[in-house]
Image (spheres, rainbow, N blue to C red):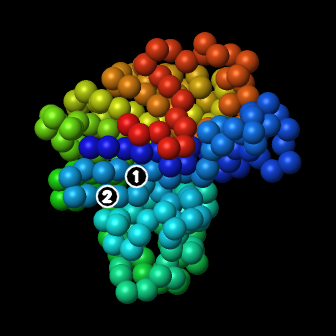
Amino acid sequence: MRLTLLGTGDARQVPVYNCSCPACDAARVYPSRRRGPCCALIECGTQRWLIDSGLTDLTERFAPHSLSGILQTHYHADHAQGLLHLRWGQGLVIPVHGPDDPEGLADLYKHPGILDFSQPFIPFERRKLGELKVTALPLTHSRPTFGYLFEGKGFEGQGRRIAYLTDTVGVPEASCAELERAPLDLLVLDCSTAPQPVAPRNHNDLTRALQIIERLRPTQAVLTHIGHSFDAWLQAHPDALPGAVSLGRDGLVL
Ligand SMILES: [Zn+2]
Ligand SMILES: [Zn+2]
Ligand SMILES: [Zn+2]
């Protein structure tokens, strides 16, 4: 099982248009510091699923028939905008599994083109996609949102569990319980901002993210959905992340 992070920015991405904070300035100089909108790829055996579709150049990155389908966490534009162009392809059907949210990015449901939205997940549903097992875990966000637990084989044939949880503030108790049924090898988690004095409404800050990591105790934790101010804050606080926690970046293979 292999997870590749393709886009690790928040809705504004890094650099933010017309921002000259240290993170945005650095991202303009060093391409590796840029953060695109939310998108990842999970591969297991013959299965190859995109997780979210925030990138707007999907038709150039993925040749026809190279994806098994798409798993949407939710339908905010920064996670789904790549579908607006992809749908107008022809001669194939791409399954898109996610929460049932007809109002999410309504034009997609009205004019789905080659996208097939007919099999949304129900909360805690476990689906077998070839060699890959996927469980949809409800998260706490401003739209219906699922995190995903992936279970499959590692490179040496051993069982692996990977959780991808964004967007969310905290993790609901029932979803935590499902994740705690066995050890997690990897947790990719929403951490949009530096520590905030008051709990944010829709996303984890670093304080909440570390609390979740402390509870779920994955072997490795990687933060994603990172905003430019958090990147800038980390430049000034380089020791803020504990040992087993690292910062996601676009192109990172896990
Ligand atoms: Zn988002
Ligand atoms: Zn900035
Ligand atoms: Zn969102």
Q: Is residue 107 above or below residue 11?
A: below
Residue in the image at 43% along x and 28% along y: 221
Q: For residue 69, which quarter of the picture?
A: bottom left
Q: Residue furthest bottom?
A: 91
Q: Quadrant of the C terminus?
A: top left
| Residue 71 in view here | no
Describe residue 190's horizontal placement relative to residue 147 as left or right.
Answer: right
User: What's the mark number on residue 144?
Assistant: none
Disc 2 is placed on an element classified as: strand
Q: How many marks?
A: 2
Residues packed near mark 2 inside 10 Å, few (<14), some (14 to 19) or many (20 plus) = many
Q: Is residue 90 above or below residue 144?
A: below
Q: Amino acid at mark 2?
A: Arg
Residue in the image at 47% along x and 22% along y: 245
Q: Is residue 210 above or below residue 5?
A: above
Q: Quadrant of the N terminus?
A: top left
Residue in the image at 40% along x and 52% along y: 41
Query: Depth check: 107 or 233 in front?
Result: 233
Position of residue 166 measured from the top left corner of the image (x, y, whole percent): 49, 44
Q: Label 2 vs label 1: CA separation?
A: 7 Å
Residues packed near mark 1 inside 10 Å, few (<14), some (14 to 19) or many (20 plus) = many
Q: Which residue is mark 1?
A: 41
Q: Amino acid at mark 1?
A: Leu
Query: Depth check: 17 or 215 in front?
Result: 17
Position of residue 98 measured from the top left corner of the image (x, y, whole percent): 40, 61
Q: Which residue is mark 2?
A: 48
| Residue 93 in view here | yes
Q: Badges 2 and 1: C-beta atoms under 8 Å apart?
A: yes
Disc 1 is placed on an element classified as: strand
* Ligand 1 under 8 Å from disc 2 Cβ: no
Position of residue 31 measured from the top left corner of the image (x, y, whole percent): 66, 42
Describe residue 49's horizontal placement relative to residue 204 as left or right.
Answer: left
